[in-house]
Image: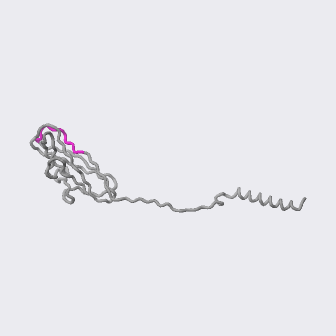
Amino acid sequence: MSPKAPSIRRNILAASTLVLLGAVLPQAALAGTATTTLGVSLTINAGCNVSSSPVAFPAQTVLASAVSQSGSISVTCTNTTPYNVGLDKGAGSGASVSNRLMTGPSSATVAYGLFQDSGHATNWGNTIGTDTETGTGNGNAQTLNVYGHIAAQTTPQPGAYADTVNVTVTF
């Protein structure tokens, strides 16, 4: 045997031991890590969305007695956002929110009212603090009923009568 043989054996034995230790030790113990943070943000501004379903009175032959019908307004505002919902006088030739008119054939009209209550005691107008509906948003749709009322009146000529009322949500 040559004098280099024990040295070669020791090197082979040492290399074999390192290989075995490498196979036995978990790889994670040999890996390094680095970390950082990821920012996530969102700004929610106060806001509201609004939609409506019409007040569609049933067909009549004469207006000898009162006719009532309801519609609705759906308001969705951010949580804790106070709001006011106002209704203007409409596109008809009515003089004010308490004197609304639907217009029909040959500019004939039918007087009607829009109210906040089913008893038709509280007119629904557009002056904040006076005749608007108020609420506070909760992040979900909130439904407000609109109560339409046509009092008995002289019946105009037959035909379709309509008006368009603007709904304004102030927040």
Look at 25% across and 48% down and name the residue there.
72
Q: Is residue 19 above or below residue 112?
A: below
Quadrant in which residue 63 is drawn: top left
Indicate the position of residue 59 as horizontal and vertical percent values.
18, 38
> Where, quadrant-wise, is the C terminus in this rendering?
bottom left
Q: Which residues are magenta?
A: 54-64
Q: Where 92 falls versus 19 (above or below)?
A: above
Q: Residue 145: where, in percent of width, then height? A: 24, 49
Q: Residue at x 11, y 38 (%)?
A: 157
Residue at position x 19%, y 59% in the image: 130
Which of the two residues, 4 or 128, is positioned nearer the viewer here? Answer: 4
| For residue 16, above or below residue 56 | below
Q: Is residue 142 magenta?
A: no
The residue located at (16%, 47%) in the rendering is: 92
Model colouring = one colour
So how many labels did they put on this image?
0
